[in-house]
Image: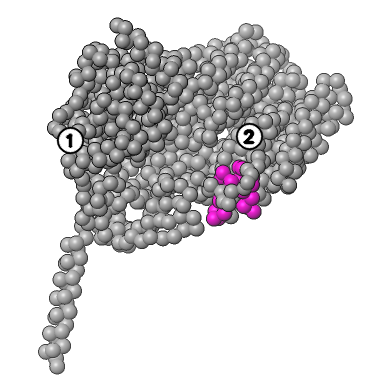
Amino acid sequence: MKSTYLLLKTLCVAACLVLSGVTTALAKEALPMAQDPVLEKRLILISEELRCLVCQNESLASSRAELANDLREEVRKLITQNLSDQQIKDYLVTRYGDFVLYRPQVKPLTWVLWFGPFLLLVVALWGMFSYVRQRLSAQTTVVALSEADRHKAQAILNSGDAP
Amino acid sequence: MKKFFIPLGIFLVLVAFLAIGLNRNPQEIPSPLLGKPAPLFSLSTLDAGGVKFGPKDMKGKVWMLNVWATWCVACRDEHPLLVALSKANQLPIVGLNYKEVQAQDAPAGRQLTPEEKLRIARERSAVWLQRLGDPYAVSVFDLDGRVGIDYGVYGVPETYIIDKEGVIRFKKVGAVTLETLQSQILPLLQKLNAS
Amino acid sequence: MIVEVGHFALILAAFVALVQGVLPLAGTMNGHQRWQALARPAAIVQFLLIAFSYGVLTNAAVTDDFSVKYIAAHSNSLLPIQYKVASVWGGHEGSLLMWVLMLSGWTLAVALFSRTLPLAMVARVIAVLGFVSVGFLSFILITSSPFERLLPAPLDGRDLNPLLQDPGLVIHPPMLYMGYVGFSVAFAFAISALLSGRMDAAWARWSRPWTVVAWIFMTIGIALGSWWAYYELGWGGWWFWDPVENASLMPWLFGTALIHALMVTDKRGGFKAWSVLLAIGAFSLCLLGTFLVRSGVLTSVHAFASDPKRGVFILIFLVLVVGISLTLFAWRAPKATLGGKIALVSRESMLLANSVLLVVATGAVLLGTIYPLIIDAMNLGKLSVGAPYFNAVFVPLMVPVIFLMVPGGIAHWRESRGKELGRQMRWPALAAVLAAAAILIFSERGTWLTAMGMALAAWVVVGLLVQIVARLQKPGRIALSFWGMHLAHLGIAVVVVGITLVKGYEIERDVRMGLNDTVSIENYSFELVGLNEVNGPNYKAMRATVNVTKDQKPLEVLYPEKRRYFSTAMPMTEAAIDAGPLRDLYVSLGEAIEGDKPQWSVRVYYKPFVSWLWYGAILMALGGLLAVSDRRYRKSALSAAS
C-alpha cells in the first residue's frame, strides 16, 4: 500500500515537473515586431519628423495607413543602405516635396518661421524695457497721505501678500 | 499715438492671409518632380512574355502615365475619359497598375510570391480592362509600390504627362476630369508636340 | 413640430440678442437709464430661449428623431444614452448651439452676479455679449442650423464617430467651450472699459474673477483633451501640436497673461492698455480658433467637416469683432493714464515680463500653425510645420516664464532690491542645481533636457515653499488667493515634472505575441494569456487578456481591445491602462499577424509620471478656484463701485 502510494506521489510530482517544464518552454519572451530593434529605433526617430501624406495630420511614425507602411519600409531600406538621416529626408523630399517634412528645413523660405519667434522676443523685450525705463522717470501726481493711511499702506506693502 | 494701431495692423495682415487661404486646398500637394526627368523603371507588362517596359522606351514621344488599380473607385470615374482620349489618338497612355494585390489577397498563413502576385494582378487587370475598355498602349505592374514612391504617388489615380526628352511636365492627383483635359492637358500637348 | 419651434426659438433669441446689444449700449450713450436696465432682462430671456432650443435638439437625439438631419448624421439608435446626449455637440452645428448656449449662460451669470456694479457698466458688458451672440446666432441660422430636416427620415442614424464614443466626449468639449466662451466676458469688460473711456483699476477688479473662472475651465478642458487623446488613441501620445490643439492653447496662454496683467492693473493701476489689449487678444484667439477649426484652411484630425462658405462667414465675423475692438483700442487706449512709478526690479515688471513672454510664446505657436497657410497663400509651395518645430521653439520660450514664477512672487510691489531678491532665491537656486546634478549623475538615461526640466520644477517648488514659510512667519490672516497662487504654480511644476520624466524615461516595446508569450519592461512583465471575441452595444471586439506582474508578483490583469464598430469600417484600439501615481502601464492591441502560429502585434508602454500631467492640471484648476473664492475680490468690487 505504502509503496503504491509512494509510487503514485512520485509519478504525480514527476508529471507536474514535466508539465511545468513544457509550459515554460512553450511560453517565451515575445519577439519584437521589428526584425532589427536598433534599426527600428532609428526608423522611429526619423519617421517622427516625417508626415503621413494620406492622413489628416499624423506623423509617419504613428500612422497605420497603407502608404505610411510602404514609406516606413522604404526608410528601413535606406537605413540599411547606410544613408544618413539628412540623405533619407532629402530622398523623400525629392519625391514628395517639403510637405513631407514635419520639421521645416531652414532655408530662406522658412527664415521667418525659424527666426521669427526669436525676433519677436527681442522686439518684445526691448519694448518692455523701454516702457519700464519710461515709467522709472514718470511723473505721477503725488497725493499726500494721512499718517493713518501711510501706516496702513506700509503694512500692506510689507506683508508681501499675494495679489 | 501711432503705436496703438500696431495690433490692428498685424490683425489685418493676418486676416488677409486667412482670406486667401480660404480658397486654397491644404490637401493638394504640388509635385516636386515637375520639370525633372521621369524616374526610370523596368516592369513586367500585361503580356505574359518576359518583355519589360520602361520610360526609356518612350523617348522621343510625348506620353501619359496613368497610375491606377482595380480596387480604386475614382479610377473607374476617369476611365471612360482615358478610353476616349486613347481613341482620339492624341498620345500613348501607359497604365501603371499600382499595388493591385493587397495583404488580404494572401491565403491565410503565408505570403504570396512575386510571381503569384504578378499573375493575380495580370488576371485582374485583364478582366477589368476588357470590361471597361483598354486605353493603354502598354500596361505595367508596380506590385509593391516602389515605382509609385519614386513618382511621389500618394493616392490613386494619378496622371503624369512626360515630354519627348523624358521630363515630367504635368501631374494630376485625383481623377482626370473633362475640365482638366480641356483646360490643362490638351493645351499642354499642343505645346509639347510643337517643340 | 417641436423641432421647428426649437428653430423658431433660436430666431427669436437672435432678435432678443440684437435688442440686448443695441438698446443698453445706446442707453449708456444718451443716458437713458431705462434702456440700460433692459440689459439684464434681455439676457435672461435670451438664455431661456436658447436653453429651450438646445433642449429640443437634445430631446431629438434622445428620442432617436432621425428626421432631424443633424441627429441622423451624428447619432444612432444603438448608442448608449449618454452618448446620444453628447452627440448633440459631436458635430459642427450642434457644437455651435452649445457654444451659444454657454454664451447666454455666462451672460446670465453676469446679469445675476453684478449687483454691485454700476448699471452703465453692466449695460455695456451685457450689450457687447449680446452683439457677440448675434454674430454666432446668425452664423448658426444662416449657414449651420442643426434643425434642418431630412425627409424621408432614415431608419437609423449614421452613428457618432467611434472615437467620440467615450466619457471624454461627455466632458471635454463642454469644459473647453466654457473656457472659450468665458473669455468673452473678459473681452466684454475690456470693451466696455474702452467705450466708457474709464480704463482704471475698477474694470480690472471686476473682470478678474470672471477671467480666472474662464481660465479654470480652459485649463480643465485642455487637460481633459490631452488625457482623452492619451487613453483613446492607442499609442500613448498626449500632445500633438495639431492646429485644433493649438487653437485651445493660444487663448489659454493669453488668458494666463491676462490674469497676471490684471493683477497689476487692479492693484497699481498700471498696464491698463496692456490688460485691455490682452483681453481683446484672448477672445480674438478664441474666435480665430473657431475659424481655423471649421473653415477647412488647415488639415487636422479634429477638424469638423469643412465648408468654405462657413469659413467666409466666420472670417467676416472675426474681422468685425476684432477689427472694431482694435480700432476702439487704438482710439481710446492712448488716453489711459499711467499707473504709479515702478522700478526695473519689482513685482510689476516681473508680471509684465510674464505677460510679454507668454504673448511671444503664443505668437510662436500662431506662426507655426498658420505658416503653411501663409506660404500657400503667397504661392510659394506647400510645407508642413509639425511637432519638431513647436517643441524646438515653444519650450525655450516657456522656460523663462516658469522661472519668473519665483522672483515674481517674492518681489515687492513698486520696488524690490536686487540683492534682497537674490538672497531669498538662494534656496530655490540650490534645489535647482541639486536636481540637475542628480539627474546627470545618477540617471544613465538622463539628458541635459531632463536635468533642466527637473531643475526648473525644483526651483518652482522650493521657491513657493520658501514664500509660504516666510509668509507664515508674518502676522495676519493669509488670504485664500495667496494659497491659490501657490497651488496653481505648484500645479505647473507638477506638469513640468510629468512632461520631463515621461519624455525622458518612457519605454516602448513593440512586439509580436502568441499565447503565453511575455514581454518585460523594467521590473514589470506582461503575459498574453487569452484572446476572446466580445460583443458591445454597437461593436464587436477582440479582447486580449494580459497578466501583469511586478517583481514576479501578480499585479493586475489588463484587457486591451480592438473594436470594430458596426457603423464604420475603421477598427478602433481601446488601450488598457494600469494608471498609477508614479507610472502608467499601457497595453495596446494591434492586428493579427499572418503566420503559422496565431500571433498579434502588441505595444506595451511604460510611462513614468505621466499622471502628473493631469494631477498638475487639477492643482492648477484648484489654485484658480481658491483664488477666485477670495472674499477680497467681491468686497473690493463693492468698494470700487461706491
Q: Amino acid at mark 1?
A: Ala
User: Which chain does the numbered disc 2 sit on?
Assistant: C
Left or right of residue B123, residue B85 in this image: right
Residue sitting nearer the eye, C104 or B92:
B92
Quadrant occupied by the C terminus of chain C? top right
Q: Which mark is residue C144?
A: 2
Q: Amino acid at mark 2?
A: Ser
Count neighbours of disc 1 (C-alpha within 10 A) and say few if under 14, some if 14 to 19, many if 20 or more: few
Residue C206, image quadrant: top right
Residue A163, image quadrant: top right
Residue C134, image quadrant: top right
Residue drawn 16% across the image and 72% down it: A17
Residue sitting nearer the eye, A108 or B156:
B156
Q: Is residue C72 magenta?
A: yes
User: For the residue labelled by badge 2, is the local secondary structure a helix, a strand or a loop?
Assistant: loop
Residue C392, compared with residue C524, is above or below; it is above
Most distant residue in the bottom direction: A1
Looking at the picture, how far across and down is residue C114, in whole percent? 76, 36
Left or right of residue A25, residue C584 in this image: right
Residue drawn 39% across the image and 29% down it: B80
- Residue behind mark 1: B48
Residue drawn 20% across the image and 65% down it: A23
Can you see residue C332?
yes
- Foreground mark, 1 or 2? 1
